[in-house]
Image (tube, rainbow, N blue to C red):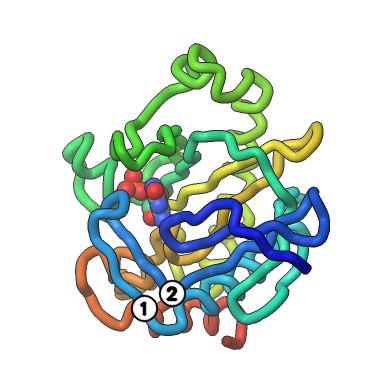
Amino acid sequence: MVKELIYQGKAKSVYSSDHQDEVVIEYRDDATAFNGVKKASLVDKGRVNNLFNAYIMQKLEEAGVKTHFVKILSDNESLMKKLKMIPVECVVRNYAAGGICKRLGIEKGMKFVEPIFEFFLKDDALGDPMINTSHILAFNWASESEIAFMRKTTFKVNEVLSKLFDDSGLLLVDYKLEFGRFHDEILLGDEFSPDGCRLWDRKTREVFDKDRFRQDLGDVIGHYKEVARRIGLAL
Ligand code: 5GP
């Protein structure tokens, strides 16, 4: 197999595979925060996120959510369907944390009456600004039906994963998803790992996600591994 680098992201690299419809995604040990401003290398992060993502994508597939995941290739590589990414981030929030607290001046930790859905433009240089469906349509980033599909699927993921984490004593506070086009379908792309969501212990509210890195709370990967253990994934 001739592996050619197609794209290098902040924590993952995308390589060509033997099949033109598939790519190899390599999970590196690199960690970044604040749109790439804070950087570090965390031992074992690539392996943990690769295996964590594979486990979650398989759970989502079992629940009827179509994803780009094909199979694990090695400790830090998986085979994925090659998507044409839609340049928006879909965020669902169940509890107040992070961006929404700053934006709306609300107290961290409050549970919303119903989950909140938000779109952001995927653009580090602009700091991923919040956008709405009107922007997405006006700039032709996605169609009306694609917007509806991404929204519906992001909420479906919330149902499936809130239960999975809740059963393990964890609160799914919020998370970010990205989607891409594959022939005539839209598939869930990117990754689901503690890098792109917030997870708190249900009783103590201890932080188990990337906020440990953002806020220098320590033992980032130890906490990712503990999440994996609690949801039934031996790492
Ligand atoms: P916030 O808007 O509060 O910063 O983020 C909301 C949720 O989406 C958090 O779980 C956060 O980790 C995730 N998220 C939003 N944007 C990004 C991003 O660009 N990269 C990653 N890894 N996660 C993001």
Rendered residue at 30%/34% (across/down):
126
Give residue 216's quadrant in the image: bottom left
Front-most of residues 170 and 15: 15
In the rendered view, does 223 fall on the left or right side of 58?
left
Q: Residues within 10 Å of mark 1 (few under 14, many from 20)?
A: some
What number is the disc on residue 225?
none
Q: Contact (CB < 8 A) between labels 1 and 2?
A: yes
Residue 185 shows in this picture? yes
Front-most of residues 107 and 235: 235
Q: Name the residue beneath numbered marker 2.
A: 29
**How many labels, in total?**
2
- Residue 7 position, x and y percent, is 54, 52
SS label for mark 2: loop
Q: Is residue 18 above or below residue 221?
A: above
What number is the disc on residue 42?
1
SS label for mark 1: loop
Rendered residue at 56%/58% (across/down):
191
- Residue 229 position, x and y percent, is 54, 84
> Disc 1 residue type?
Leu
Rendered residue at 35%/38% (across/down):
128
- Residue 6 position, x and y percent, is 60, 52
| Sequence-first disc among 1 and 2 | 2
